[in-house]
Image (cartoon, grey):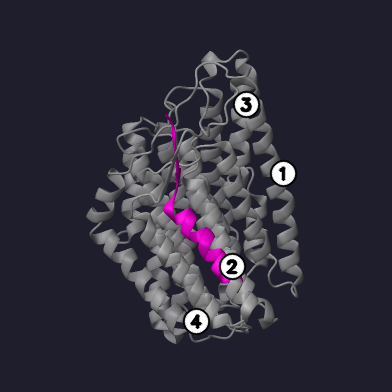
Amino acid sequence: MSFSFLPNAVLVLCLGSLVQLAAISWRRHVARDAVLCVIVLLASLASIMLPTFLIMTGSLPLFSSDSWGSYAGALIILSVIAIVLMSRHGAISADPSVNSEYFILLTLATLGGVAMTCAVNVISFFLGLETLSLSLLGLIAFRNERLDAGEAAMKYLLLSGVASATLIFGFALIFAETGSLRFAMPDLSHLPEPMIGTMGVILVLTGMFFKLSAVPFHLWLADVLEGTTIPVASLVAVTSKIALFAAMLRYFSSVNLGVPSAQVNEILIVAVLSMLGGNLMAVVQTDLRRLLAGSSIAHVGYLLVAFLSPQPFGVASAAFYLAAYAISTLGVFAIMNGVLPQGRDIREWHGLFRRKPAAALAMSIMLISLAGIPPAVGFFAKFYIVAAGVSAHQILLLFVLILSSTIGLFYYLRLILIMLTPAPEGYVSRAELSMPTPANATLIAVLACATLVLGIVPGALVDRSQGIVVTPVPIPVHSTIP
């Protein structure tokens, strides 16, 4: 008899979003709604560690309750809590009467992301994906008085729709061959028409790469990060990446990716292109948000190296790298939001060490972590990825990883050098320094300390990552179509 689990975090987030909606219907109060959002997120985080509340029998499983889903879900929830803390009161939208909806959309985005990480059925995965995507669309366009926000939302809407349609087409082809809606790659050797199944898997991969903004499906990311607010940009760059990567790893968990095949070749090509393309894109940028978009694309490529490296280090290195990437990237966005929210041009950051030494030091810690320089956590995370690649004999991917990481050193260290040097003569800065809110300042301090502590003493996170298990979804051998 099969069992169907409803993850605790999904249940709590569903109920929490209803409570938030009822509170707004009763009376609008932005500060209260922000606190209520944090309470819901903390409750969902605590519920992950408790036994499953709802277990039903005799039905098709929709979710898994394994440690991989719990780990990725906890990362998503913690990331959204950080995003709430960096969301300035009154800066979310020019119209304060709509700011309460911002926090409901954050809760719904978290709900979609958490549902994706533990989905074992195409239906539950796609519902989570669309919940996340539609929430992101509303958040990207939230500042509707700005033209660039509308442009970013329109680009995200069109390309997200294309990606979703590609995924649905791929799932439909696979269902036509297997008669199953299990969220797992089918055994292509046992299908009546293996070519149709192969095309379905390639379409599913392509749709996921669109959502991950991996090269060559990356062109929307820089425009979206540039057009939206800083907290929402961090949501796109961090939370959605964790959810998509966690779901993709689960989808291929029962397949030996060490055996050459059409889908493995696609992943290999996209990994190489993402590592090189993301770093080369970031090198030529003068806009800090577009630079971070290139950095995010490159890190997707690094994660794909772990994805293509089976046990003993594949899943563990990916889990560790997701945490390191989330901490460092959220730290950069938190400093941008707290110190120079209008500082898009990297020249605006000239002389920050003299004007705001604590913020400049924290920014440098985050940047050296993203670059993979010790003693920050990013160094050990990248070393872990290399160890996984060596164990899987991924020579080409390791060569490209080292080459692209060397390119990445240039723009990360260039930004640190800019903060150390005064502005050139004749350059007039248009951005004014601001004082971080107490919540944002606390967030920056916590993330900076975590970046250093986990880099110097990574043992606890390594042990946690090595204990993660991705429960494979049973794949039916024969078609169940009547």
Choose mark 2 or mark 1, whichever is in front: 2
Q: In this view, does 399 lie above or below 243?
A: above
Residue underneath mark 4: 422
Query: Residue 250 at x, y = what percent?
Result: 46, 38
Locate residue 43: give its quadrant. Answer: bottom left
Q: Where is residue 168 in the image (x, y as percent from the top left)?
A: 67, 36
* The label number, if any, that marks residue 162 in the structure image: 1
Q: In this view, does 75 lie above or below 254?
A: below
Q: Report the Cα–Cα distance between label 2 and label 1.
A: 26 Å
Is tag 2's residue or tag 4's residue first in the polypeptide sequence?
A: 2
Pointers 2 and 1 in contact (C-beta within 8 Å)? no
What's under tag 2, amino acid-wise? Ile
Percent from the top left, x then y, of residue 79? 46, 63
Q: Which tag, 2 or 3, sits closer to the chain's start?
A: 2
Q: Residues within 10 Å of mark 3 (few under 14, many from 20)?
A: many
Question: Which element carries disc 2, helix, strand or loop?
Answer: helix
Dominant SS type (magenta): helix
Residue 69: image x %, image y %?
Answer: 42, 46
Residue behind mark 3: 175
